[in-house]
Image (spheres, rainbow, N blue to C red):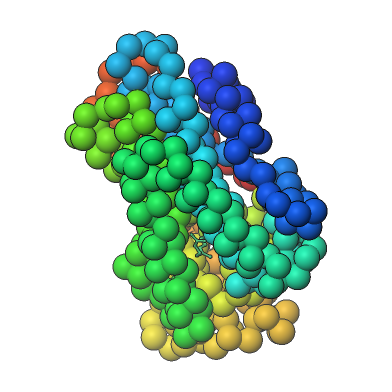
Amino acid sequence: MITLDTIRKPVAADLEAFDEFVDRQFTAEGELLSGMLRYALSSRGKGVRPLLVMLSAAMNAPSRGATTGRRACLAAMLVEMIHIASLIHDDVIDESDTRRGRPSVNARWQSHKAVILGDYILARNMNIGLRSGQFDLVTHVCGSMAALCEGEVLQSDCAERHAMTRRTYLDIIFKKTASLIGVSASAGAMAAGAPNEKVALMQRFGEALGMAFQMQDDILDYKPSARTGKPVYNDLREGKITLPLLCVMERMDESRQAEVAGRLKRCREDASSLEYLQRIVENEDGISLATSVMRSYLSQAIELLTGFEPSEYRSALIDLCAYVGERDQ
Ligand code: FPP
Ligand code: MG
């Protein structure tokens, strides 16, 4: 299986520069806030978004190996901090105690402080961005924040009603995940000074990759063997109908669909309802149906890359597509 370390190699120096840039720029006043900030930034996860920014910037640079420097670091910081803040808020909303295998910020410092930390990260991000004077990047990246909120509200509404359609599911994951991944890919191209049509093409590439990324996340939620650092079957406990269950439900008649909705309503307290839902996903091909939808988005993403000249960066982006489809963490 292809590893992220291999994919990172062509832009390893840029990613190092990015880490130094964040350490220099992202500081906080006061002991408590700076301790919380350090905690949030010390486990940054896979870093898919900064990686995408750097690969896209390098692939779109005017000459091979031309350094894309500060603008790419700024773009990577803008997207990654929005992502980190959104997960801190998401854990408060989901009342989740664990993130990446360790206590979530809300579990460690309580929800009200976690909300403020998320806000603080967004505020600092905006501040650093505006002070840089790189208004094209700030406008482009920060313009995606509203979509994350729209996706989250739509998702909460569906979870409360125990209802979902394919169209709404696709809308939710586009807004909550694919939009920011699309912006990561396009911001990298923009940072490198690529023409508008290439920026737009990278955005479509990132969005297709982002759709697949969230679908794989939803699939891994059904796999006890996955190494996500999150409890398994979390989505079911939260009342969420994601792609594996949705694919199974689409093949059911109305009375079975009503039975599923009833089980979903009870499954937070009732272990047998949770088990029932796990079993139908397992026995009725939910994982393989969802995997084939996910792969169709990866094929679209790879197809979009044919609009760019071959290079080691383009190959790394193709490898990133393979990684997203195979990952177990
Ligand atoms: C994780 O999804 C959550 C998101 C991708 C987006 C969360 C967005 C908000 C809370 C809106 C606030 C927005 C900003 C800009 C601060 P998930 O719950 O499916 O994944 P998980 O299993 O990792 O928690
Ligand atoms: Mg969550």
Q: Residue at 34% of width from left, 20% of height from top?
A: 61
- Tell which residue pokes out farthest to the top in this image: 64
Across and down, in percent, residue 228 comes to 67, 50
Is residue 85 depicted above or below 69 in this figure? below
Q: Nearer the viewer, residue 187 or 130?
A: 130
Q: Residue at left 60%, top 72%?
A: 93
Compared with 303, 100 (above or below) is below
Q: Along the line of sight, which residue is nearer the eye, 177 or 237?
A: 177
Residue 49 at least partly seen: no
Q: x, y percentage for residue 46?
A: 61, 40
Quarter of the rendering containing residue 203: top left
The residue under the point 27% across, 27% down is: 194
Residue 64 appearing in the image: yes
Horizontal side of residue 64 vs 73, given as left or right:
left
Residue 110 shown left or right of residue 184 in the figure: right
Q: Residue at x 40, y 52 (%)?
A: 142
Residue 270: x, y in percent? 71, 84
The N terminus sits in image quarter: top right
Determine whether 269 is above or below 194 in the image.
below
In the picture, the quarter occupied by the C terminus is top right
Task: From the viewer's side, name the closer residue of 53 and 158.
Answer: 53
In the depicted structure, whether residue 189 falls above or below residue 324: above
**Can you give x and y, in whole percent of width and height, for residue 280 in the image?**
56, 71
